[in-house]
Amino acid sequence: MFGGTHGALAARWIRALSLLSLVAGIGCGDSDGPSVDTDAFTEDPDAGPIDNRTFLELCAQPELYCSRLYECAEPDRLAEDQFFFDHTDEASCVVAQQEVTGALCAALNASLEAERLTVDLPKLRTCTDHMELLACHDYVHADPTSHVPCQGSPFLAPNVPVGGECAQSAECMTPGDLCTATDEALGECVVAPLAGEPCLDGLCGEGMLCVDDVCIVPEGGTCLIDWDCDESEWCDQPGVDFRVELEDPELEGQCTPRLLGGANCEDVGACVEGFYCEDTHGADDEGFRLPGHCAEPRESGAACNEPADCISFECTDDICE
C-alpha cells in the first residue's frame, strides 16, 4: 500500500502495531541491532522441528487473539476493542482482525519483499512462541514488550535513507522522516516539516499539528486515538464521537485531561477512571451524540441503553445484568 490519501496511515503503521500487538503476539519498538532477513533458521535436529513460519504467519493470528479476547478480557479492554475494530462476538472479531491486521501485515510484508524493511525472523518467532504460551489474561492484557523475548519487537528495521525510494514512512531509516509516496507511485524519504513550514500531505514533525496546511506546535500533545495520550488524558478530536464512529485515523487531536464526574462530555473515553460518558441526550441528525455527562456505571437491575451503562458491561433487554 502506498501513501497519498493513505499517507498518514502509512506513516503510523508502526504506531498502529502498538494497538495491534496483542493480535499478532508482537509489540512495537525499535530493533536492537542488525536484523537478519531469512525465511527459516536451522536448529539442532534433536531440539525439535525447524521453524519455517513466515512473517505473514507470525504477524496475523486473528483466531487465537479473538478466542482469548472473548474468553478472559476485562470489560473495559473488550469494550475498547469492540469499538475500535467494530465487532460484537468472537466470529465478527476474527473477520475484523483479518481485515485490519491482514492489510497491515500485507503492507509490511510487501516492504520486506522489496528489501525496504528487514525483519529478524528468529527473534520474532521466539517472541510469538512466548506470547502463545502465556495464560489467557496475560496474553490479552500484558504489553508484549514487557516480556524479555519480545523486547525490541516487532524486530523490523527500516532500510531507506533520506532521498531513497519508499512506499511508507515505516521504511525510512531516520526516526521522524516521512515518505512522499502516493496511491499510484513510490515516493522518497524526506525530513518531516517543522513548525511554520507547509504540511506534507497533512503530516508534520513529531509533536506538531497540521492546521490550515501549516505545521504548528499545539498547547497539548498531538494524538490520533486515546491510546496516544497519558492515562489521565483522552484524545479530543473535534466533531468525532468514539461511540458513534471510529476516531478519524486522518484527524489529529489534542491530549486533554479526563473530565470529572458530572462534567459534560461527548466522547466515551473523556471521563476519569470509574466514570463513563453517559448517553442521556440522544444524537443529532448526523448521528453524533449530543453532550452527556460523566457518570458512574449502573448497578444490576438498572435501566440501560448499551453495555457501557452497566458495571457488568452487560445490557440485556434494556436492563443491566
Image (cartoon, rainbow, N blue to C red):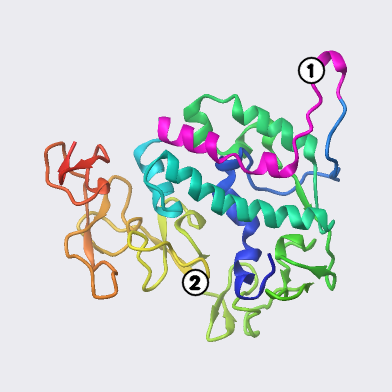
> Does residue 137 appear to the left or right of 175 in the view shown?
left
Position of the N terminus, as image quadrant, is bottom right
Secondary structure that dominates the magenta span = helix
Residue indicated by mark 1 = 48
**Residue behind mark 2:** 251
Query: Which element is circle 2 on?
Result: loop
Q: Position of residue 294 (x, y in %)?
A: 24, 56
Name the residue: 53% across, 32% down: 139
Residue 58 lies in magenta, yes or no?
A: yes
Q: Is 47 on the left-hand or right-hand side of 129? A: right
Under mark 1, the amino acid is Gly
**Could you tell me which residue is drawn at 71 percent across and 65 percent down?**
169
Q: Amino acid at mark 2?
A: Leu
Relative height, residue 47 to residue 198 (above, below): above
Marks 1 and 2, Cα distance to the nearest angstrom?
49 Å
N-terminal-most mark, 1 or 2: 1
x and y percentages locating residue 122 in the rendered image:
79, 34
Element marked by disc 1:
loop
Q: Quadrant of residue 25?
A: top right
Q: Estimate how packed mark 2 is, as few (under 14), some (14 to 19) or many (20 or more) residues with alpha carbons within 10 Å.
A: some
> Residue 270: percent from the left, percent from the top?
34, 58
Which image quarter holds the C terminus? top left
Q: Which callout, 1 or 2, points to the residue nearer the camera?
A: 1
Which quadrant of the structure image shows residue 264? bottom left
Task: Identify the magenta region.
Answer: 43-71
- Residue 225 tag number: none
Residue at image position (47%, 33%) is 67
Q: Nearer the viewer, residue 48 or 73?
A: 48
The crowd level at tag 1 (other Cα within 10 Å; few <14, some 14-19, many 20+) is few
Instruction: Find residue 2 and report its horizontal and vertical position in percent.
Output: 69, 68
Let me know if residue 142 is in the magenta part.
no
> Residue at 41% across / 53% down in the picture?
86
